[in-house]
Amino acid sequence: MDDKFLKPYDPLETEPRIYQEWEESGYFNPDRMIADGLTDKDAEAFSIILPPPNVTGRLHMGHALMLAVEDVFVRAKRMQGYRTLWIPGTDHAAIATQSVVEKEVSKKEGKSRYDLGREELLRRIETFASESHDTIVGQVKTMGASLDWSREAFTLDETRTRAVREVFKRMYDAGLIYRGNRIVNWDPKGQTTISDDEIVHEERTATLYTFKYAKDFPIAISTTRPETKVGDAAVAVHPDDARYKEYVGKEFSFTFCDVPVTVRVVADAEVDPAFGTGALGVTPAHSQIDWEIADRHDLPRPQVINEYAKMTVEGRLSGKKTAEAREMVVAWLREEGLLEKEEQVAQNISTAERTGGIIEPLPKLQWFIDVNKEIPGRGKSLKQLMLEPVRDGRITIVPEHFDKTYFHWIENLRDWCISRQIWYGHRIPVWYQGEEMVVGEAPEGDGWTQDEDTLDTWFSSGLWTFSTLGWPEQTEDLKTYHPTAILETGYDILFFWVARMILMTGFALDEVPFRTIYLHGLVRDAQGRKMSKSLGNNMDPLDIASRFGADAARMALIVGNTPGTDTRISEDKIKGYKNFANKLWNITRYVLTETEGVDENAALTEPDAAIRAELDALIADATKDIDEYRIYMAADKLYHYAWDRLASELLEESKTIFQSEDEAAKVSRKALLISLLRDVITTLHPFMPFVTEEIWKSIRPADGLLMTAKWPGKTV
RNA sequence: GCGCGGUUAGCUCAGUUGGUAGAGCGCGUCAUUGACGUUGACGAUGUCGGGGGUUCGAAUCCCUCACCGCGCACCA
């Protein structure tokens, strides 16, 4: 027996060494598996593309969960003989990464991005991104992820840029991408537009003011933003509202807080006659809903607020911030005796997810993807392209009930604003010269200027399953591994990302990006709180791995964690699985000691054969659990078998047998123990790859790496 | 407002097609030079949120109510 078993299992010493062996073997790469005859070249493919972590710093426990779950599937399938590929990568995460670096620069040097300039800021971001990348790769390896590093991708590298430009051009040519002047979500703090999904609603109390524009104006209106009223073009009332019927169609001009304003009274069914005075002051340029009302009634759209959330009108409000302007307008209303009522109301305010800035709806010339337009030659819209595969079962969501959330979101989807006024990211592939415009690749010759804006980061992540496989080239990888088998990610990015992948893949490849969406929940602390910097309850996967081992962290994240449900993690739980690793270690020590030199193929006695059959049944069960995405159950079953059945019962009763005079029983039991241990270690490998691999070296020294061993009972 | 999920042992959660409730942690008692104290044995605690229904039988299916959490939308 190996001397190493005389000491308790030491994950810290073992894990990095084992990972290095795996990497050096080259077997994370399926081509190598095939070349060495470990995988059949005609075997069914099984592929997962790693959701690329943002290069914004370090990984957290949510990433550790993602890696653990995906590695379980990948290792199990690899052992079952599938042609298995798991591709790593990172995401440039445009807006997220740029804000982190901007904050840093502002804190350390007191400089804004405009002080640095585009080129210098980009240089800083790239340095930061590359450092983050290296940290992240190190962390991913620590967790034991069996990723094929030879195929690593980055959302902003050359191949991915080619894919982005190609999709952009095809969508543009299909008339799905258009440039339009529309009201967008402007983040004055980040100085960029953002999509609807990047908005976070915060509940606050606000004052609702009820007043008339002028003494001789017949209708009172209510608003929480009186400063915007200098940009009003209409007052809208419900068509059936008897109170205001006589005014519909009439136009009124007056001076409102030094600003000349003309409003028309219009009838619009969207207006709720029961709210406030039943009359709505319409500010087309600074409210989404009002913009739509303006569409219906052909109203002018005077802009009165700029990109810095400052007033652009003449008079006393000129150049004032909106908050200050609001107070001035209220003061003016009081002076003029126009204010009728003030009340406190609860209000959801829109803020930008990344910067916390309060969103200012502004009309701007931006790029959009039309989700409702029929795709030429396809007879359906992008929206339908997103709905159909989930409806007809080509894509399954685990857990299933999330399909309702998915449908609900898509049905309410509006055109996707894809241009951003930040500098880090894929620059919009459009070049201008005078009236001319070229889309796709840079045109020859001088005098062309590229669009200043960059693309929403989700545009490039939407291509991830096929851009990582080399598209638009028709590569072997693309043919073999696409569609991918599983997309495993957090339910919180179902819309941001998952839906966009279905959209992009449906459009570009007329295919689904994956067959199954496995959604994991949030990892919370022992008290059920979200992990956050401000609470100081973050767990660092590296720290956990160094104290308990990555195997223990993986088990703790997987057992009892059902898809779609948040999970709590505590050091106690992780410690429990560290003990389990040691338990396996000691089981091995006992079996090795007792079975030295015995015939492992000896015939089993009847009772021993029954025990062997019992494990076969359990493994069949656990295999089915893995196939049906219940890895939390598979892990739990194997854990209990190893500890409660194998160690506590079978090993204990073996002691009696080994002390007895029954030689046949002894021989049989020894062979049995060897075979039970071998299969327990094998089937636990996807869950606890390090300790099982280390044990394998001692129990099957001639059989190569456990990661390439055959899964008992099931092959592809 | 619309939608989704949850409510099971002190705590955290499993419970796959309906068949008289499970795990981990914690707690209690006992054991011990044993493969392992990172141990073992034994033990206690449950009107499975309330009510109703279907069924021979419901934690599980249906209806309803309550509370908690989340998502989307949003009233100006």
Image: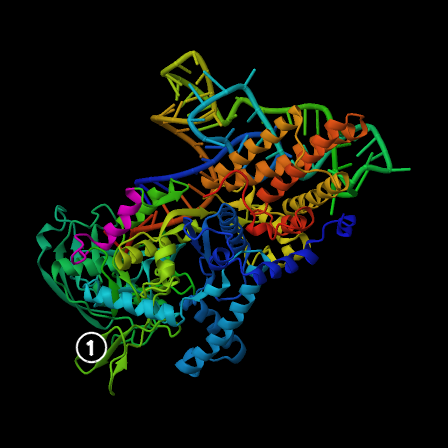
Query: Magenta stretch containing residue A634, yes or no?
Result: no
Residue A198 visible in image? no
Is A592 placed left or right of A16 in the picture?
Answer: right
Residue B55 against residue A556 in the figure, above or below: above
Nearer to the camera, A569 or A593:
A593
Residue A209 against residue A679 in the figure, above or below: below
Q: Report x, y in % for residue A215.
A: 19, 62
Chain under disc 1: A
Magenta segment: A373-392
> Which residue is under mark 1?
A437
Residue B23 against residue A238 in the figure, above or below: above
Q: Report x, y in % for residue A76.
A: 51, 46
The quarter of the picture where residue A496 lies is bottom left
User: What amino acid type should be assigned to the residue bearing mark 1?
Assistant: Met
Which quadrant of the figure contains the C terminus of chain A? top left
Q: Report x, y in % for residue A494.
A: 38, 51
Residue under the point 12% across and 49% down: A239
Q: Residues within 10 Å of mark 1 (few under 14, many from 20)?
A: some
Q: Report x, y in % for residue A42.
A: 41, 51
The quarter of the picture where residue A360 lies is bottom left
Nearer to the camera, A669 or A50:
A669
Is A581 placed left or right of B17 in the picture?
Answer: right
Colour pattern: rainbow
Is A253 placed left or right of A483 in the picture?
Answer: left
Residue A95 visible in image? yes
- What is the secondary structure assignment of the residue under circle 1? strand
Nearer to the camera, A629 or A47:
A47
